[in-house]
Image: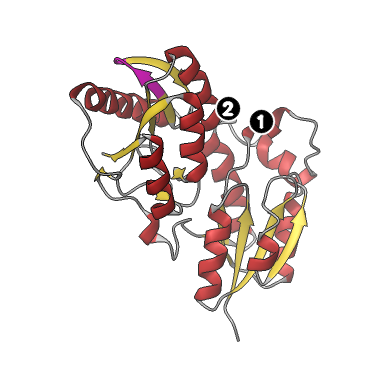
């Protein structure tokens, strides 16, 4: 009998790449896809797909249990702004959120993981089967950074690590050793756009993992969209966390970055 595995699919390419790898591994993948967030491409990649609203936590649990799924991963972005929207949360989710001291990312996600564990559903590392996607160190796009770029990259990296440690966000935008934008609830893309506008181009983007990163969720991910946003914002360099950043569509992204004049460095 095929091993059954679960996927909680948010936005972006990451859930799709995981689904492709799960199929290559011969797994029967049961995907819970969040309506209005997950890509419709998941329908052709997973063995079975259940589309649910973002607030239907109990329904998610019931589906996994009915499908005899005991192990799952979370992949893809879920905008935190839903906390302040008119989305209806079911009773299970409302009660879970009431138990936590604050609505920081780690607090929410750890509470959800705990609830799943209480139902016999284990959340595995999001890099399961995909360790080959973790970025190495050095200038990934080749070449070298000039002295000013390298100083900005290191400065932005260190500031981003401190912000990530406070569970505020994982991205900052800097220029000339000054912080232009810090990611908060608006998300990475909007922080980059804001920083690019304030710096009038030529800015450095630092996107890092948390100091005590839980690999089960919220791992930093970069891909084609990251470069597209940087180009629109006038950003010239992206600095990331070596060994702790998931790099999607690596060869295509490197090619696109080079042709767009964007450097990628991992520290």
Residue that protrudes farthest toward the bottom in the picture: 1
Is residue 183 in view from this perspective?
no
240 within the magenta span: no
Residue under label 2, please give it: 185
Is residue 60 in view from this perspective?
yes
Q: Is residue 224 above or below residue 130?
A: above
Residue drawn at the location 42% of the way across and 14% of the way down? 199
Magenta stretch? 173-177
Q: Position of residue 41 (x, y in %)?
A: 67, 59
Residue under label 1, please give it: 81
The N terminus is located in which quarter? bottom right
Q: Is residue 173 above or below residue 217?
A: above
Residue drawn at the location 80% of the way across and 31% of the way down? 86
Separation of residues labelled 2 and 1 (CA atoms) = 6 Å
Secondary structure mostly seen in magenta is: strand
175 within the magenta span: yes
Q: Nearer the viewer, residue 211 or 18?
A: 18
């Amino acid at each position: 009998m095929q091993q059954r595995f679960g996927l909680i699919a948010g936005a972006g390419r990451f859930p799709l790449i995981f689904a492709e790898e799960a199929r290559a591994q011969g797994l029967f993948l049961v995907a819970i896809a969040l309506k209005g967030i997950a890509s419709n491409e998941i329908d052709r990649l997973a063995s079975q797909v259940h589309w649910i609203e973002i607030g239907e936590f109990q329904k998610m649990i019931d589906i996994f249990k009915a499908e005899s799924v005991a192990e799952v991963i979370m992949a893809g972005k879920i905008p935190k702004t839903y906390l302040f929207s008119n989305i209806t949360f079911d009773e299970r989710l409302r009660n879970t959120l009431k138990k936590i001291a604050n609505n920081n990312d780690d607090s929410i996600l750890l509470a959800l993981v705990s609830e799943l564990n209480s139902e016999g559903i284990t959340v595995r590392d999001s890099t399961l089967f995909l360790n080959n996607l973790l970025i190495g160190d050095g200038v990934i796009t080749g070449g070298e950074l000039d002295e000013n770029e390298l100083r900005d990259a290191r400065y932005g990296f260190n500031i981003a690590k401190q912000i990530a440690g406070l569970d505020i966000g994982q991205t900052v935008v800097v220029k000339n050793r000054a912080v232009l934008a810090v990611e908060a609830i608006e998300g990475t893309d909007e922080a980059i756009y804001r920083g690019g506008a304030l710096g009038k181009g030529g800015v450095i983007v630092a996107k890092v993992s948390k100091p005590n990163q839980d690999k089960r969720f919220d791992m930093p991910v970069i891909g084609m969209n990251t470069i597209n946003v940087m180009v629109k914002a006038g950003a010239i360099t992206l600095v990331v966390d070596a060994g702790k950043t998931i790099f999607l569509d690596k060869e295509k992204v490197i090619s696109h970055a080079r042709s767009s004049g964007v450097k990628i460095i991992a520290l």
